[in-house]
Amino acid sequence: PGHGEAHARMGELARGRGDDQSALVHSLQALRTDDRAETLLAAADAYRQTGRPGDAIALFQDIIARDPGHVTALRALRDLAVAEGRWADALPAQERLMSAVAPDERTSEQTSLAGIHYERGRARMAEGDLTGGTAAFRDALRVRPDFVPAALALGDAHMQAGDPTQALRVWERAVEA
């Protein structure tokens, strides 16, 4: 019962046959004696599969606290946070990921960062936070000046704020980009 690697392997087998609940039970038992990143990742994935994203996010954050450049955990945290619309968790993970990935991967990660800023802006606008939404759209455009959805949304935010001149400037810059 105290052999962590045996439970980890049993969790893998359960996951392979589609038994997510058993995979979670075995992964959690493995964590009692084995707190390696691989074991934490397996438990986080089991939490995600059983519909417990908050617990999965907490485990991913634990891995990142131990190893701030753990690319697998950063990507998993970002992806889960994005899927859950938890932009406050997705943004720092993506920002860390930008510095942790190889240079040839930075362009796609930069696009993801701009997208997270954009979605954060949309969420803030939906909450009625015009200032926060505008700032998030600007952040997206700082990351990717040619990110048209953010430019359109920023222009719309300026229109909503009653500043059509600024909206027109933003849209003109987007056309030029």
Image (cartoon, grey):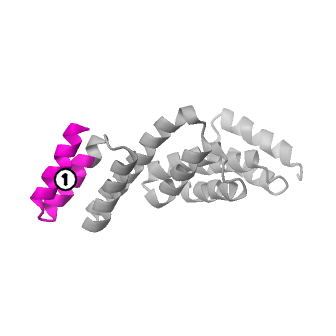
- Asked whether 35 or 22 is in front, the reply is 35
Left or right of 111: which side holds 60? right
Left/right of residue 129 with respect to residue 69 in the rendered view: left
Which image quadrant for residue 173? top left
Q: Residue at x 60, y 36 (%)?
A: 102
Which secondary structure dominates the residues rendered in magenta? helix
The three-letter code of the residue at mark 1 reads Gly
Percent position (x, y) of residue 75? 57, 44
Q: Check disc 1 and report its element: helix, strand or loop.
A: helix
- Where is residue 3? Give x, y as percent: 89, 48
* Relative vertical location of residue 22 with respect to residue 64 in this rendering, above or below: above
Residue nearer the viewer, 141 or 159? 141
> Would you say 60 lies left or right of 129 here?
right
In the visual, does 107 lie left or right of 153?
Answer: right
* Residue in the picture at 16% in, 51% down: 169
Residue 28 in view: yes
Above or below residue 110? Residue 16 is: above
The answer to whether residue 51 of the structure is visible from this angle is: no
**In the image, residue 88 lies at what x, y percent?**
47, 61
In the rendered structure, does residue 171 fall within the stretch colored magenta?
Answer: yes
Circle count: 1
Number of residues whose C-alpha sits closer than 10 Å to that of mark 1, classed few (under 14), some (14–19) or many (20 or more): many
* Residue under the image location 73 percent in, 35 percent down: 13
Q: Is residue 19 magenta?
A: no
Q: Which residue is mark 1?
A: 155
Q: Nearer the viewer, residue 84 or 2?
A: 84
Q: Residue at x 37, y 43 (%)?
A: 144
- Is 28 situated above or below 102? below
Which quadrant holds the C terminus?
A: top left
Residue bounds of the magenta highlight: 151-177
Q: Residue furthest right?
A: 2
